[in-house]
Amino acid sequence: MKRKLLWGLAGLVLAIGAVLLLGRGWLAERAFQRALDTSVGVDQSASLPDGINVYVCGSGSPMPDAARAGPCIGVLAGKQAFVFDAGSGSIRKLMRMGFPMERIQAGFLTHLHSDHIDGLGELLLQAWIGGSRGAPLPVYGPDGTDKVIAAETQLYDIDKGFRIAHHGPQVARPGGFGGTAQVIALPDGTDSQTVYDQGGVRITAIRVIHDPIKPAFGYRVDYKGRSVTLSGDTVYAPALVKAAKDTDLLLHEALNKRMIAALGAKLAERGRGDAAKIMGDIQGYHASPEDAARAANEAGAKALVLYHLVPAPPARLIEPLFLGDATKAYRGPLKLAQDGMMVSIPAGSEDVTFSKAF
Ligand SMILES: [Zn+2]
Ligand SMILES: [Zn+2]
């Protein structure tokens, strides 16, 4: 009797195993079909409210980080899309977030440090092919932007030929490849200026302080009474505070000087003098989390997100150490940016709502 039961059980286990094994292909096919139905070719921005929607496509810095792409902020204002900086790895995150590349109007560079332009080629490529552009992408930025755009255009010239030949000029439109540089030159004594004003969207370039890198800009986007302001790389900058007056969201860079000093000391102790010197040099041209909090307070910003985190806290446990006294200095909602973070700032309301695309 016992033996019979054992045989019966073994048979049942074998049968279940066979069903699972044979059904695996069917399950995989079902899952794949479901992914096709729900995401491919779907305009994921269609469900977003009218107003300003912010995509954090890169929250990192030049420091290597598997979870954070280099600096990049996507902004959808009404139906117009913009990208501010294109750090390494950021554009694929932007696309993964469902950013409507077919509606991109322009790119903006805060300054020409490599970590802010490493992904520029990918942005131009995605704007062209992913966005089906028939004209080059206008790219606004400081003096030297023309040189960078010319170099990127040259760099991708062979690839351009391959794609036009392969997909045909109806799909890979020859005229849509590359960018046109729109160099921003603020007159001496002027700290901010409108550089884009179309279809109800106004974008202002703001002179920030990132010496010896001059000029360096932050930007403010206004649409239907709502706004977002981003600092780019800067120390505490009075012109940014002024231009960010009453903004709904301030995205400010942040570097924790105590943590960077400790990193430098450890590098020096281990005989890495050059790297230790760099840790000393970078402290002078970035803002501390407390500086960012002060700027947000003085501007009357309704919410503050810190990005371009140096060093990015590798775990939640370390976040309070990174923030220091910033949470005391700024009383509104303060968050550390993560790649995939989205912020919704709907028109006709006071709301600032955070969510995650992944
Ligand atoms: Zn920089
Ligand atoms: Zn930077």
Image (cartoon, rainbow, N blue to C red):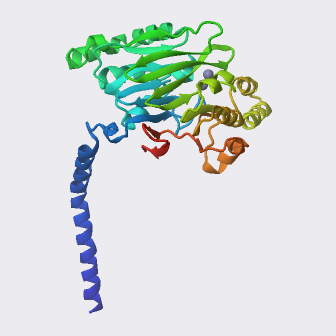
| Residue at 25%, 70% in the rendered image | 16
Q: Is residue 231 above or below residue 49?
A: above
Whether residue 223 appears in this view of the structure is yes
Q: What is the residue that sits farthest to the bottom in this orientation?
A: 1
Q: Is residue 255 above or below residue 167?
A: below
| Residue at 48%, 19% in the rendered image | 108
Residue 36 sits in quarter: top left
Q: Nearer the viewer, residue 2 or 127?
A: 127
Total numbered labels placed on residues in the image: 0
Q: Position of residue 161 (x, y in %)?
A: 29, 12
Residue 43 sits in quarter: top left
**Is 134 left or right of 310, judged from the image as shown?**
left
Q: Position of residue 64 (x, y in %)?
A: 58, 33
| Residue at 35%, 22% in the rendered image | 127
Quadrant showing the C terminus = top left
Q: Position of residue 72 (x, y in %)?
A: 50, 29
Q: Position of residue 236 (x, y in %)?
A: 69, 27
Q: Nearer the viewer, residue 224 or 20?
A: 224
Whether residue 89 appears in this view of the structure is no
**Is 115 left or right of 28, judged from the image as shown?**
right
In which quadrant of this rendering is ligand 2 seen? Answer: top right
Quadrant showing the N terminus = bottom left
Q: Nearer the viewer, residue 14 or 98?
A: 98
| Residue at 78%, 30% in the rendered image | 268
